[in-house]
């Protein structure tokens, strides 16, 4: 167990270092001139040089890498050209809004995807299974941003049920004192019910949009995990002993499926932090994604760089936490020889590939 | 499906290929039987045919020029003269969707093909040669894969600038690791096979063994992945365009059109965004269904 954790931590540190280098490479080595992009390509030579100087682009690569590292070590991630704050501060204040969205949509996706996946897996080949498979394929073929717009057309423009897609609350809502920077939690804590319910109403459409797209991979993974368990020796034995379907589900299936779903959830969550850029743009949701979008349209390089870096880091840390949790849930890893589990071939990434990269410990091990 | 697939899915052996012309019709019947047995193949082929025909026929016979502005006919709802309505510049949405479908389809295929070629070659070297080369390549792959691919493509596109070529490069770079990793693991299962050992024992050059014996036998999984990837590429490229980082207006690319209609959504002019989105879904569905079928086959044969 201890060896596994140390190995896993070492791998995470290595990957984090790699991420820091890759982000630098992407923003500094790739053939492209940020100064030129900033000016829109119409500046004369002198203006261009002035901007290059201001952005530090005329210094040597080593010097640029040095100040880049310093910004990371100091925890500032540089200064945003548009807001004037440090990028780290900007991202931190926008993190709660993005987290609200990610948590809400993951809850929706889990509530739908896990039971549906278990039913489909336990009755392989049945009508329910067929519907589940179709739903998973269709769910991964819908563009997130299009679904968001269609929901606005139906529920706001047509039925007038949902509020206008303009952020977390309507403009006249009383903003509660800020304890957690999460509007929903703050209004709940201060007992500000009208703001709380307004915030919930605003959360509904963006959360459903992300939730629908997220349901497909969760359903798919749950189904294949259930299938695997159903075919296992221990389930066959349990059947032979005459245990009822429900008892087998409780004692064998759920626990084994849980580990796989846990892995998926961790990665899905990481994806949401990054992928919410589309949904936040549509619903004007004041999170990290909208910040990144603003940074992209104003070519605010430090902000873009900081955002990508943070998402990459969060992604790696989530994977780490999931793997460690995995070892708690699955005793085979805890007591196995070198971290347990047979060496599986990486599977073809399907439903939500960006959501389900093969979990780390079971791949590159020689 | 698994078990029943093995028999049906097996390719006709050499004795079938050597058969007399009299047996030919059975091949067509075989294809039909395959279609009826695998709804994902049937639906996928149908959608793919539909999308390709629309893209080709539409380009030749679109009712209007997709870029022609007509201020007098702006924001018309769908009707007899404009089936999908018109946008804020009076351009015909139907013609734009038809053109855009062709653009997105082509981009999806190009991205998948590029990622397949580059990824499988590096993956082949990584898996077959092994050693420190493999170690270095796999560490890099691990790191690149720790970014959500959409975000990686986005950041690359932001830096290198948003021409069609650059967007294709950006998305391809983000996809290469998936193919690479899959090819490598597939090569690892093949490299110890008897025919590989035989070729080596016969003194064949390493490059010859890799190209003629290892790669063809390891190509299944990466090919399936590339099929699915064409669909992802359409989603990602149109997503980038939607954010303004990908292909630029006035191109009738589908993501550009959805973005353009987004500002008219709340005032009820839904058709500018909704129709291009439906075209995206149909194209992606085609690839997803075909990929699903191919994956079923692969698993059925593999076990």
Image (tube, helix red, strand yellow):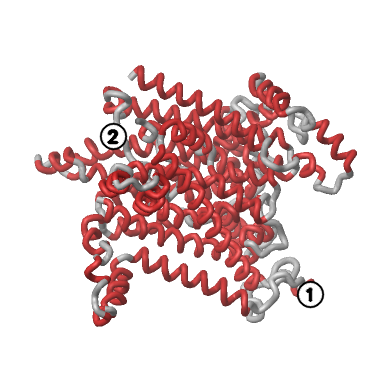
**Residue at the top extreme of this rendering:** A2
Q: Which chain carries label 1?
A: B
- Work out whether A197 lies above or below A119: above
Q: Quadrant of residue A139?
A: bottom left
- What residue does disc 2 label? A342
Q: Where is residue B266 in the image (x, y as percent from the top left)?
A: 66, 58
- Tell me if residue B188 comes above or below residue B164 in the rendering: above
Residue at (30, 47) in percent of width and height: B202
Q: Quadrant of the N terminus of chain B?
A: bottom left
Q: Residue at x 50, y 31 (%)?
A: A316
Residue A169, label in figure: none
Q: Where is residue A211 in the image (x, y as percent from the top left)?
A: 48, 47
**x, y percent for residue A156:** 61, 56
Q: Residue B72 carries which label?
A: 1
Q: Is mark 2 on a helix, strand or loop?
A: loop
The answer to whether any part of residue A134 appears in the image is: yes
Q: Mark 2 or mark 1, which is nearer to you?
A: 2
Q: Are marks 2 and 1 on the same chain?
A: no
Neighbours of disc 1 within 10 Å: few (<14), some (14-19), many (20+): few
Q: Which is nearer the eye, B45 or A33?
A: A33
Q: In percent of the image, x 26 and y 54: which residue is there?
A: A124
């Amino acid at each position: 167990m201890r060896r596994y954790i140390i190995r896993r931590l070492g791998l995470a540190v290595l990957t984090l270092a790699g991420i820091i280098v890759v982000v630098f490479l992407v923003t500094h080595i790739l053939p492209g001139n940020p100064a030129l992009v900033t000016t829109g390509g119409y500046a004369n030579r002198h203006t261009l040089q002035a901007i290059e100087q201001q952005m530090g682009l005329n210094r040597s690569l080593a010097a640029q890498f040095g100040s880049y590292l310093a910004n990371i070590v100091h925890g500032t991630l540089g200064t945003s050209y548009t807001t004037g704050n440090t990028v780290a501060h900007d991202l931190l204040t926008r993190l709660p809004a993005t987290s609200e969205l990610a948590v809400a949509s993951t809850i929706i996706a889990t509530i739908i995807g896990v039971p549906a996946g278990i039913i489909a897996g336990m009755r392989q080949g049945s009508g329910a299974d067929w519907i589940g498979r179709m739903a998973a394929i269709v769910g991964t073929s819908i563009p997130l941003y299009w679904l968001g717009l269609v929901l606005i057309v139906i529920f706001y423009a047509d039925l007038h049920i949902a509020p206008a897609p303009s952020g977390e609350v309507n403009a006249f809502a009383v903003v509660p004192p800020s304890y957690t920077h999460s509007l929903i939690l703050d209004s709940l804590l201060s007992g500000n019910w009208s703001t709380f319910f307004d915030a919930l109403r605003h959360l509904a459409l963006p959360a459903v949009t992300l939730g629908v797209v997220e349901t497909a991979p969760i359903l798919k993974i749950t189904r294949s995990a259930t299938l695997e368990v159903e075919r296992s020796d221990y389930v066959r034995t349990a059947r032979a002993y005459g245990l009822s379907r429900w008892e087998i589900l409780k004692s064998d299936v759920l626990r084994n499926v849980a580990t796989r779903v846990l892995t998926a959830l961790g990665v899905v969550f990481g994806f949401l932090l990054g992928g919410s850029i589309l949904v936040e743009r549509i619903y004007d949701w004041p999170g990290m994604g909208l910040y990144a979008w603003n940074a992209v349209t104003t070519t605010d390089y430090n902000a873009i760089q900081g955002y990508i870096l943070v998402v990459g880091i969060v992604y790696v840390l989530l994977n780490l936490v999931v793997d460690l949790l995995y070892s708690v849930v699955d005793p085979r890893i805890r007591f196995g020889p070198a971290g347990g589990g047979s060496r599986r071939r990486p599977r073809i990434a399907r439903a939500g590939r960006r959501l389900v990269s093969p979990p780390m410990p079971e791949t590159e091990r020689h | 499906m698994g078990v029943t697939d093995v028999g049906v899915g097996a390719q006709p052996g050499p004795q079938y290929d050597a058969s007399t012309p009299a047996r030919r019709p059975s091949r067509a019947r075989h294809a039909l039987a395959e279609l009826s047995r695998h709804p994902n193949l049937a639906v996928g082929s149908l959608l793919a045919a539909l999308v390709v025909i629309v893209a080709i026929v539409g380009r030749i016979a679109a009712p209007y020029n997709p870029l022609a502005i007509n201020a007098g006919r702006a924001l018309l709802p769908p009707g007899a003269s404009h089936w999908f309505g018109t946008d804020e510049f009076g351009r015909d949405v139907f013609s734009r969707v038809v053109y855009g479908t062709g653009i997105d389809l082509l981009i999806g295929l190009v991205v998948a093909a590029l990622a397949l070629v580059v990824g499988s070659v590096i993956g082949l070297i990584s898996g077959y040669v092994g050693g420190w080369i493999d170690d270095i390549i796999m560490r890099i792959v691990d790191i690149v894969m720790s970014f959500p691919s959409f975000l990686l493509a986005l950041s690359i596109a932001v830096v290198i600038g948003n021409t069609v070529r650059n967007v294709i490069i950006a998305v391809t770079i983000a996809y290469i690791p998936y193919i690479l990793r899959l090819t490598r693991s597939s090569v690892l299962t093949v490299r110890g096979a008897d025919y590989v050992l035989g070729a080596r024992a016969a003194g064949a050059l390493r490059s010859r063994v890799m190209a003629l014996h290892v790669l063809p036998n390891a190509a299944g999984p990466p090919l399936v992945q590339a099929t699915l990837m064409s669909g992802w590429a359409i989603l990602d490229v149109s997503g980038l365009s939607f954010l303004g980082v990908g292909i630029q207006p006035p191109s009738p690319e589908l993501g550009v059109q959805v973005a353009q209609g987004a500002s008219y959504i709340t005032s009820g002019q839904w058709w500018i965004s909704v129709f291009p989105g439906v075209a995206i879904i149909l194209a992606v569905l085609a690839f997803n269904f075909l990929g699903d079928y191919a994956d079923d086959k692969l698993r059925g044969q593999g076990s």
